[in-house]
Image: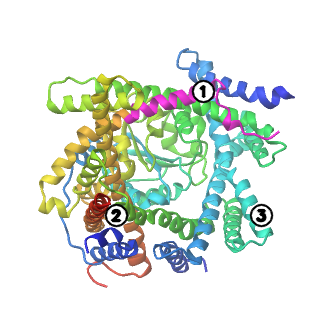
Amino acid sequence: MLNATTGTWLAAFLTLGLFSWMYKENPWFRLVEHIYVGAALGVLASQGYQSVMDIAWKPATQQGKTLLYVPLILGALLFSRWSKKYMWVSRSSMGFLVGTLSAVVMTGAIKAQLTAQVAATMMPLNSANNIIFFVITAAATMYFVFTLQAKWASPIMDLGKYGMMIAFGATFGNTVMSRISLFTGRLQFLLFQWLKLTPGGS
Amino acid sequence: MQFVKSKLPVVVTFGAAFIIVAQYYFNIPAWKTLAAEFLRWNVIIAAFALALGIGGIVKLHWGRISRRQPTAVYSAATLITLAIFLFVGLYETTRGKTYTWLYDFIYNPVAATSYATTFFFITSAAYRAFRIKNSYAAVLMISAILMMLQVGVFSVYLPVAPKIAAWVWNIPTTAGMRAVTIGAALSVVGNAFRVITGLERGHLGGGE
Amino acid sequence: MIKKLSDIDVRWLYLIMVIFAIYPLLRPIGLPLPITDRARNSFAAIDALRPGDLVFFGIDYSPTQEAEMWPQTLAIGHHLAQRGVKMVMLNMIEGAYRYEERIRDFILSEYPNYQYGVNIIALPFTAGREAAFNSIVADLKGLYQVDLAGAALNTLPLWNEITGAGDFDMYVELADAPDWWLRPMSQVPGLKLWNGTVASGASTMAPLYQSGQMVGFIYGMAGAAEYEALVKKPGSAAAAMDTQSMGHALIILFVILGNIGYIVQRNAEAKAKGRK
């Protein structure tokens, strides 16, 4: 029963259910929407379980890496968050998780995004493109980071805002491209995998 | 007990972060080994955290079912789907055939389609919300349209369009986004610093 | 009449969109696909790899972005396999493991010179994202004990050749999220970074490519279609480019229609106010 044919029909039922929202919200759409929540959470949890098994449980129990019992216990303590009374038990585990993550994000951002990006902006101003690039970066950074109130800074801030608008406009244009692609992907599934049509003929 | 409940988590946050950050300043092999071990622990604890959302969702939907609300049937669909994925994923592992079938024919289509429906939001936004109300909006729109002009049909009938679009992308867009990157990095560093030093404690949660 | 332009039921627009999206899929128009310099340079960066070079191949996207990312994965998988590099695949996103399985199986079936464990390995899902990448940088071999299929890694010859992240020549990341992989991986000395991503996230990565922190960068279905053309393996991205083209034309038309209606309405309102 759990073969590719029944699977493809089920997938088509679910796909069309979500697309039925296009006309108006309806029970079919709401059912599939709720199935998505359950499935997404189920995938998250089962993947997490698998990862714990692969990265910690098996090495700890089968290869004698006993130190890994520490994160296994800390991880299990996280579930105390499900109880208001015992939520405090999870705090140290959460503190460890967020503390280590904050440390790597902070050091990584300073090196890869702050220092490297500022350094790359220090370019020779020997071409129109380089000058435009430098001026927009500097003006937009000023607008983004500083809140200068001085009158003399107003044109710089304006230039920065225009620079940002160009960037956000391009991002919107690319988002359109993304969304059309995602829609096309589902159409390709419905037309070619489910209905088994062929391009150039049907 | 009060120390364990409120002070210890802040000490653990700072201590764990300090071990990671300090390895960049001191070339001590044992320290680096400890930092690597801490990172591995983070990965393991993060895997547990992936299942944390279950608690809230089960509570919410079970509540709807037990109160026999009109949406109870949908809540039942969520819980049944979750139970199936969990049971199969844990019993058969995520490498099993049944799990793969569930993934390919239930999770994959609903996840892909839920994002694909945003295409209609974008269509609606293009028509209803993308209005030239001032010069900033005009610049934003021109930039967006130029990006869209890069594809297929326009490169045939308007061959200059992709060239202009490439310039807009390479120079002003990249320059503008660099400012955003620098600003975002500063913000990330600032937030991380607040967490590490205990000024920000939201992640520790409430409760008793 | 013109006033009505700002008041069309959007469901008509959806219907027009659907028709114009389906038609070119069934009856391809074959519009040309210009190849950008960015795609050519990115292709050249992978083309410069020598047989036997060691490459990380990160598959970090979920089904939500499959339409854009899977064609990229196939095209780049072809190119890496054509170059004969040794590949270590990994995934850090919940749900990405299926694409890792699929590209592993695809390469093993299409390229007979690839033998699992000898010149290609697939690592299992790891949670923690940025911390997990940092863990790879700090101690790759300490982090992983089993592969994607659950087999012990120390039985695989390629794994036994590797000492750590520093052995790798390039990191090719196909991700639907922007920069959390780059911050850690850019800490590995001499490791070249290469990124394929979704179009909506591309502007975030553009400054990192311009600065030279990445040697390659493609995005979206258009990037995948260009890469398919460059590796001479036309696939689903190339087939969808006519629809992309139609979709963009219609969106531009809707923006113009909406604005004409808006301007007419605004002028009418201003006139009415003036009369009062």
Task: Name the chain under label 1.
Answer: B
Residue A103 numbered mark, or none: none
Quadrant location of the C terminus of chain B? top right
Whether residue C208 appears in this view of the structure is no
In the image, the segment drawn in magenta is: B180-208
Question: Which residue of the protein is positioned furthest toward the bottom in this rendering?
Answer: A202
Is B135 situated left or right of B92 in this image? left
Question: What is the spatial separation of the Cα atoms under label 1 and label 3, in whole angstroms?
Answer: 37 Å
Q: Earlier in the sequence, mark 2 or mark 3?
A: 3
User: Label 3: which residue?
Assistant: B63
Whether residue A132 appears in this view of the structure is yes
Is A149 situated left or right of A41 in this image? left
Question: What is the spatial separation of the Cα atoms under label 1 and label 2, in whole angstroms?
Answer: 42 Å
Task: Name the chain under label 3.
Answer: B
Q: Which kind of residue does numbered mark 1 sit on?
A: Arg
User: Label 2: which residue?
Assistant: B127
Q: Nearer the viewer, residue C46 or C39?
A: C39
Quadrant location of the N terminus of chain B? top right
User: Label 1: which residue?
Assistant: B194
Task: Name the chain under label 2.
Answer: B
Q: Earlier in the sequence, mark 1 or mark 2?
A: 2
User: Where C238 falls versus B192 (above or below)?
Assistant: below
Marks 2, 3 in one chain: yes
Q: Tell me what residue is drawn at x 51 percent, y 26 percent.
A: A107
Residue B195 x/y as whole percent: 62, 29
Q: Nearer the viewer, residue C94 or C153?
A: C94
Q: Tell me what residue is drawn at x 39 percent, y 48 percent.
A: C201
